[in-house]
Image: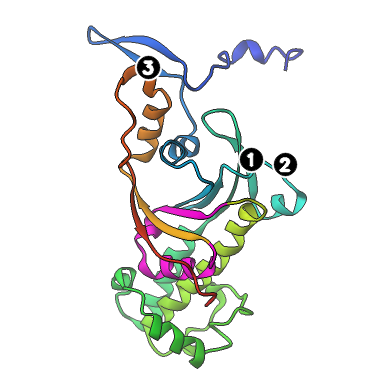
Amino acid sequence: MTEEQIGDKLPPIKNSGQVVNVGKEGKNMVAGTGLHDSSAALVPYQANFSEPFLLLSTGTWCISLNPFNQHPLTPAELAQDCLLFMDYKGNPVKASRLFTGRDHENGVKKIEGHFEKEALKYRALKFDAELFAQLKIAYPAIFGNNFNDEFDNFDLNRLKTSEEAYYFLIFTLVKKQIASTRAVLDGTPVKRIFVDGGFSKNNIFMNLLARAFPHTEVFAASIAQATALGTALAIHSAWNVKPVPSNLIELNYFGIGQYII
């Protein structure tokens, strides 16, 4: 980088907690150096929880962030779309990702087209443990641990209702999520998984995920403007003399799993 003189074209490296004074509309204020959005989203959790945790940030992408896994990437992890980035203090964070939001959207469209019904209502369904148990009995080849086909390739004629199809869609997405999360979870003392973003509001997704990790507490987490809040917390001491509030994150506990996936 020195020989190519690239360094001369880049801004100097600064600590994420450093601030600069800026003026705007006649007022003085402080501004941080800037954070990557995933690094910033982790900050509220790091500020509130000291025991090892994993954050599953969901939406278009579902990204498993484990700030307590700092081991070098292995070839197997790279093949599973894992990466390492830095948290706001410069420590490594191992992460994996899935394009789950796109897969969910395509799956819902497929259900709508096949059953000729509006499937959006199923996003708000409450998880029915008895129904899911019945589905596993009625369709052992489909709702079994050995099913590894893609939902895109699945013949929906094998199911009777759009509700069954939606349960199956979420089942396939959670199975992928289990593998992706375990890729960065194994070998670390994580006892809590926090899920935020869109899928944290999907009751079927959350219940199936909780049951897949029987020795881990799984929570749906709700936090307003997590990325913006994280950047503010990173420079908290520079602009706020009050302690960081302990109620920044609203948690909904989904219990300890039962190995039903």
Q: Earlier in the sequence, mark 3 or mark 2?
A: 2
Is 47 placed above or below 120 here?
Answer: above
Above/below status of 216 relative to 43:
below
Residue behind mark 1 = 84
Identify the mark at residue 201; answer none if there is no mark. Answer: none
State the residue at coordinates (50%, 91%): 137
Q: Looking at the image, is 181 positioned above or below residue 7?
A: below
Amino acid type at mark 3: Ala
Please name the amino acid that badge 2 sits on. Pro
The reply to whether discs 3 and 2 touch (Cβ–Cβ < 8 Å) is no
Q: Please, which colouring scheme is shown?
A: rainbow
Q: Amino acid at mark 1?
A: Leu
Q: Is residue 243 left or right of residue 53?
A: left
Q: CA distance from mark 3 to mark 2?
A: 34 Å
Residue 238 badge: 3
Location of residue 142 by image quarter: bottom right
Image coordinates for residue 135, horizontal then vertical, percent: 46, 87
Which one is in front, 69 or 150?
A: 69
First in residue order: circle 3 vs circle 1: 1
The numbered disc on residue 72 is 2
Would you say residue 194 sits in the magenta stretch?
yes
Using the rendered image of the protein, determine whether residue 59 is visible from the camera's viewpoint: no
- Which image quadrant: the N terminus? top right
Mark count? 3
The one of 212 and 247 positioned closer to us in this rendering: 247
Taking the spot 43% from the left edge, 74% from the top edge, the residue there is 110
